[in-house]
Each structure stands twice: as structure tokens, then as C-alpha cells.
Image (cartoon, helix red, strand yellow):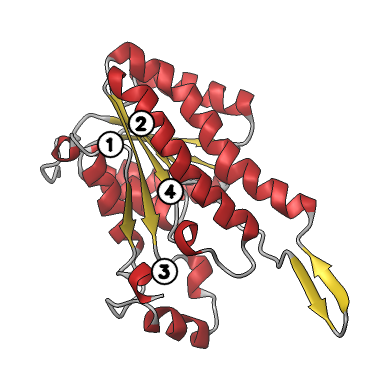
Amino acid sequence: MAQGYGLQGKVVIVTGGAAGIGRATAMRFAVEGARVAIWDMNAEGGAAVLAELKSMNIEAIFQQVNVAETEAVEKAVAEVIGTWGRVDVLVNNAGITRDGQLVKYKDGAVAGTMSDASFDAVIGVNLKGVFVTTRAVVPYMIKQGGGVVLSASSVVAAYGNFGQTNYAATKAGLIAMTKTWARELGKYGIRVNAVAPGFTMTDMVAAMPEKVLEGMVAHTPMGRIGAPEDIANAYAWLASDQASFVHGTTLCVDGGIVLGT
């Protein structure tokens, strides 16, 4: 089953692993023969992915975890350590959106704004959640002599996105955290990198109007929307020793959309 990245037997945590890119990432590491802990708030989706992994004879567990809650994260990490004794790879994939314009102005008056609740919710999961989860995992990686931390940024960190003040801010913040942690953790043998997906065919994107999808493709030099597996492949490579000197970087997996904007 293993495909040659040397990840067989590695212990991998994938946050937001019940669907979309997270699910594809969990499956990709499973194909490599890794042991996978799936974290998600979606219990039904997580159980379905777990059943699929079990059918492949993969060692796997599902944990219902809100990454924004420190106590829940620390408990879940302790359970992974209790099950397998180590964490080799952390994929900080969990993320949410709560879109809205900073200020919507219409007919000479303010028609709406992005609420504090929408801003705080996205910051809590997308930014604080990565901070809390990485902080909980890193001490174990230091003790075992190394590991890999990977986080999901986005191309919107580079060019912004209409109606996504909160989301774009978190994805830009993850790039800064990745660079900071690379400086702090490299001496312990812990590699830290981020992946910045472009438009990717998740359930959320698939539900968009056809005109919007056509616009995405038109702005992508490769002429297509990415598949979750495209991002999962990048995570697997970055986790492997083939990327052993890749540290503190953000890998754009976007079909060239940043060039096309």
C-alpha cells in the first residue's frame, strides 16, 4: 500500500479531517501506511472517514475536537500519545468561513457590517486553533527528537478576497506563524511549513453558482479548479524526508492563480 514517501508507521493528526481537503489528506497518509488521527467537529463525517480507513486496514482513530478550545485539544493530543506513543506529523487543516463585507454601503447609508461574532469565530478556529494545537503537540515532538508541522494557509493571504477580512487575515497570519515557528523549532528537528491552496473543489466550492466557478477557472492559468487530492499530495511530500530541507516556507498549490490575478 505504501507509495514510497517513507511515511509508513508514522503517526499523523489531521484536523478538519472529516471532509474535503482534510479527508483527502487523511486518505493520502493512509495510502502511505501512516497511522491517522482524524479530528473534526462533524462526528458523522469523521465516523465515515474512520470506517473507510479501517476497511483499508489502517490504524486510525476519530476524535471530535474543537481546535479553538485548549482543554479539548490537550486532551485529544494526550489520547493520541496514549494510543501510539508519539506524533510525527501535524496537519493543521481545520478552518471555517463567515463571510461579509467590512462595511456594506448602499443608497447613502450603511446596510451592514462584518460582525464581531463572525470575525471572532474565524480567528478562533483558523488562527487560534492552529496556535493551540501546535502548542500542544510540539513538546512531544521535541521529546521524540523531531516532527513535521504543516498548516493550511490560502492564496487569499497573498491578494486578499472580497468579503473575507477575517478569513484572509487568518491565512496571512498562518504564514507569519509558520516562519516564526521555523526559527524557533528547527533546532529540535521539527520542520514547519504551510500550504496555500487555490480554488479547490470542496463541497463549499461545488455549491457555488456556475458563473462563479467559470470565473475561478478563467483566473487560473492551469485552466481548472484544484482537487482535494492535489493539496493532500503536497502535504504528504512536505511530511516526507524528500522535503527534509524545506523549512519555513509556504507552498502554493493553486494552478498559478496568483499569477493569473
For the question of whether residue 85 can be seen, the reply is no
Query: Which residue is identified by label 3?
Result: 201
Contact flag, marks 2 and 1 (Cβ < 8 Å):
yes
> Residue at image x 29%, y 19%?
187
Mark 4 or 1, nearer chain start: 4
Q: Are there few (<14), some (14-19), or many (20+) residues within 10 Å of tag 3? A: some
Residues at marks 2 and 4, CA–CA distance in whole angstroms = 15 Å
Residues at marks 1 and 3, CA–CA distance in whole angstroms = 28 Å
Towards the viewer: 180 or 60:
180
Q: Are there few (<14), some (14-19), or many (20+) residues within 10 Å of tag 1? A: many
Query: Which residue is identified by label 1?
Result: 247
Towards the viewer: 92 or 2:
92
Residues at marks 4 and 3, CA–CA distance in whole angstroms = 15 Å
Towards the viewer: 81 or 249:
249
Query: Which residue is identified by label 4?
Result: 152
Q: Quadrant of the C terminus?
A: bottom left
Mark 2 or 4, nearer chain start: 4
Q: Quadrant of residue 236?
A: top left
Q: How many marks overall?
A: 4
Query: Which residue is identified by label 2?
Result: 182
Labels 2, 4: front one: 2
Contact flag, marks 4 and 1 (Cβ < 8 Å):
no
| View extreme (left): residue | 4
Residues at marks 4 and 1, CA–CA distance in whole angstroms = 15 Å
Asked if residue 186 lies left or right of residue 31, the reply is right
